[in-house]
Image (tube, coloured by chain):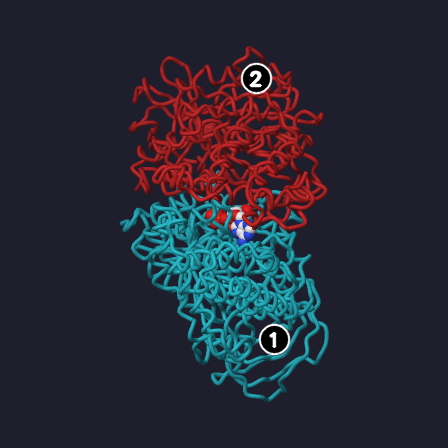
Amino acid sequence: MKGILEYIGIDRISGPLVVISGVKGVGFGEVVEIVPSDGRSRQGRILSISEDVAVVEVFEGTSGLAQPTTRVRFLGRPFEITVSKEEVLGRIFDGLGRPLDGGPVPFRGEKRNINGLPINPVARAYPQDFIQTGISAIDGMNTIVRGQKLPIFSGSGLPHNEFAAQIVRQARLLTEDEGFAVIFGAMGVCHDEAQTFRRSFEESGILKNVAMFLNLADDPTVERLMTPRIALTVAEYLAFEQGMHVLVILTDMTNYCEALREVATSKGEVPSRKGYPGYLYSDLASIYERAGHIIDRPGSITQIAILTMPDDDITHPIPDLTGYITEGQIVLDRSLAQRDIYPPINVLPSLSRLMSDGIGEGRTRKDHANLSSQIYAAYARARQVQRLASIIGEEDLSATDKLYLAFAREFHERFLQQGTDENRTIIQTLELGWELVTLLPEQELTRLKPEEIDQYGKI
Amino acid sequence: MESTAQQPSVTMISGPVVQARPAHKFSMNEMVEIGDERLVGEVIDLDEDLATIQVYEDTTGLRPGADVYAKELPLYVELGPGLMCEIFDGVQRPLEVLRGKRGDFIHRGKTGTALPRDRVWQFTPSVRPGATISPGEILGEVPESQLITHRIPVPPDVQGTLEHIVPKGDYILDDVIAVIRSSSDKIHELKLFHRWPVRKIRPYRERLVPSEPLITGQRVIDTFFPLARGGTAGIPGGFGTGKTVAQHQLSKWADADIIVYIGCGERGNEMTGVLVDLPKLLDPRTRRPLIERTILIANTSDMPVAAREASIYTGITIAEYYRDMGYDVALMADSTSRWAEALREISGRLEEMPAEEGFPAYLASRLAAFYERAGQVVSLAGKRGSVTLIGAVSPPGGDFSEPVTMHTKRFVQCFWALDKELASARYFPAINYLQSYSAYISAVEPWWTEKVGSTWKILREKTINILQEDSRLQNIVKLLGEEALPDDQKRIVEGARLLKNDFLQQSAFDPVDTYAGPEKQFLLLDVILHFIERLADVVKARIPLFRATELPVVAEIHKLKFTRRGDDPGPFKSVREQIDKEINALLHRQDSL
Ligand SMILES: Nc1ncnc2c1ncn2[C@@H]1O[C@H](COP(=O)(O)OP(=O)(O)OP(=O)(O)O)[C@@H](O)[C@H]1O
Ligand SMILES: [Mg+2]
């Protein structure tokens, strides 16, 4: 085992980074303890190391560190967390995994490197178990399966928290299965938001199956870089070693990315788009890819990350790179929210890539895929008609176009719109879908097969 | 901890970039192993003092002072029987073997050889002792999978007189199967496999101009933006527009002999999806499971970034190797943007001067060199083979003016531009037919007109005219509505709608529609165009157009793409007849009024 090495004095401080020279025998990525003269130690990690200079990022920030008197201890191991079922579930921790609930520091379990390891693609089992969330726009058109990573793209002030909490409450993954857990990782969210989630877990009686890792808005930003990794390390243990179905909620990934940018800027790195580092994609992937199923292991990790799109811009690097990694996205829309439509899901840019294997005969119903495709096609067309109507007026629309307008109305008011505790079965959702598409003349239903229309569309 | 004068050691570690001293112990692009765990890396820069190494594995815990072992070979792959049906990581570690040895998660460090040393292969020699052997010549054959006969070549850098060759029999990879004496009296002991540096293009005798289509079974591609054997194609598109599904479709249905699929910095589950699907699907030509012709390279987005850069080269070298045996190989790279970003990341750590968007200035030349490795050739062994390259491009924000898309566009001959708006209406494949192009149309035209239908070219051009006219009219429709158009223009809009819904759109997930052979494509297009042409008669007779678009035959046209493969022209013929019957009846009724 490598021993602990201690040095006194820091050469340079730059943002969240400190530079220490004369360092020998320490390894890349290892944990560092920074102890200022007040004795309240902070944690950090080695970002680069040369023959005698180490660059360390300090999770709790560098303010108040005095160069000559600060002691630096190199622990000779990567950042680790103790994983166990009993000591973690039903608890609340800070963003670095230290108890906030007055309970003991977990110590009985095994220690795990929070960076985890990539799952060998040949060991993955393809996710295909349908999860009913009771929300029509998801179940009907963007179906989630166990082991999927499906983020929510939101905007500031939109009801993403209520929405995520509703998913947690209603998702059948959770209510029918004994072996389930929810791991909640918060990065830079305010205290109230964390409380909302906590209350929601409490009300649905699942608090004992929840572990919360909270890095709140006034907590150190660099610490945020560790929080999702800690949450996922616990999740992996519960899913792949304890056989539990784990739902991981990560919020807000935008705060995470900003912390990453801050560190990169302090290091003087060449930025890529909007000042974010060129490795933002790989870094996010090292979080999002930690979801899934493994062959011959009973558990799974389903990941719902929430992010707020800066300026509601879906092409901003954070949502953009997220969308390139995750298996789809649910996009919340401000204009729908302003019209009091809840959940304000814009289905057009939303997508679930694992949907096709999770639906159909024996899973949901055999008409599901084509019905969903038809609703998409009709809604896309209806939005065009709405634009046209705003130019030429509704009266001058063709008869068919008028039906599309009616379709859009019904879609918003009946299909999309539902209460925060309204839990629809998949059959209810599909039937609602049929009611909508059959508003249109049959020759418009090109995505549906005639026999499907005969069987489901003519009741 | 002074390192000894002789043994080179690490001086600096920053993520995947490591420096070592003394530099003179290394050569450029040399493979190295680092530390007790023997992490694999490659020398990417040398100055008088330091060697810079990119490491293909996680470097956490690595310390300055760790030993570095120079391997005296550039980064190479093993080429021989055992590649087929395998899945490798970016530096050719076999992932199944890795799982067997180390479990479900990928651990770092050495794990043995790329190709299995214990597997027995039946080798049948095809040359006799005493023969003069030229570089790349075939020594004999090994049945590698049910579909693929592996022709064992002499390495391209070996030639001479065949001193000895083993008789037909069972051998393992390490057995010496032939001995060649070069003109300078050097003895080469050849095995069933050889090593080849991944960054070096494998030599061939002659380059041929691509002339035959690579049929993909995807209508919009084959009929409108065709690919040629030995050609190049780029598929750019924002997230979720269908790049991966398109590449999976091509892996399944393209009529190549061999598929090399590189998952370069993409999702783990997508590799799993291929591994689950391909053994279950049958090759439409050979009726054998498609996996038997497929080689997978996986560097998923959570695997080390430097190996992502290498994965592209690992894949293309394997593709060239089979090309040299006389096979048509199609290589998919999903996504070349992740490869370019890996270049950028390494370049950033080297503190090189960035060019556009932080990419290194050599991005364009690297991309060019990659696509240059496509082609139809006569190999050193005198066989005609090809490598077709299909690269996905993932432009940030879906904006095609970014460097990787722009440069790719310069080097590829087919450009299949995916469109966010089409994808969000679930219109797939979301290939924007106004922005896409193929430079192979005239090259493949003789094949289509001879083998499939003499009117292919005319049908194609008529269709394109309708689609282009439609897109002009759509500008009016957006402002005034379709009702504002006169019937002859409405006919175009209606016609384009039929073409889009019933021909261009193709579901990857429908068991029948997923693949359409050339005949089916031709017949289907012919029927739809025939209907559109007959609509002109309806317009001429001043019959309201909707009377014709409401005819029962329209539903029959919709159904056609879901009918069985095109080898049976029956249904197409009968729908064509029904079109005439119903339209004639309509015209007749009008006349008699
Ligand atoms: N030909 C098709 N038929 C039916 N559905 C399709 C087709 N192409 C794409 N899709 C749908 O679009 C989704 C996204 O496609 P895909 O995963 O190929 O996107 P992508 O361009 O590779 O995105 P990314 O860049 O994020 O990897 C698929 O999950 C599927 O639902
Ligand atoms: Mg993709």
Q: Is residue A327 visible?
A: no
Q: Amino acid at mark 2?
A: Ser
In the foreground, A59 or A369? A369
Q: Position of residue B1 (x, y in %)?
A: 42, 40
- CA gap, disc 2 and disc 1: 65 Å
Q: Amino acid at mark 1?
A: Arg
Q: Position of residue A416 (x, y in %)?
A: 53, 30
Circle 2 residue: A200
Q: Is the residue B210 above or below the residue A370 in the image?
A: below
Query: In the displayed structure, does residue A392 sit left or right of residue A201?
Result: left
Q: Is the residue B181 above or below the residue B220 in the image?
A: below
Q: Position of residue A24 (x, y in %)?
A: 40, 35
Q: Is the residue B71 above or below the residue B453 in the image?
A: above
Q: On the rendered image, what quadrant is the C terminus of chain A found in?
A: top right
Question: What hue does chain A carry in this figure?
Answer: red
- The chain letter for the residue carrying disc 1 is B
Q: Secondary structure at mark 2?
A: helix
| Residues beneath discs 2 and 1 located on the same chain | no
- Name the residue located 33 percent from the left edge and 41 percent from the top edge: A273
Q: Is the residue B459 above or below the residue B140 in the image?
A: above
**Chain represented in cyan:** B
- Name the residue located 65 percent from the left edge and 37 percent from the top edge: A130
- Name the residue located 31 percent from the left edge and 55 percent from the top edge: B47
In the foreground, B377 or B470? B470
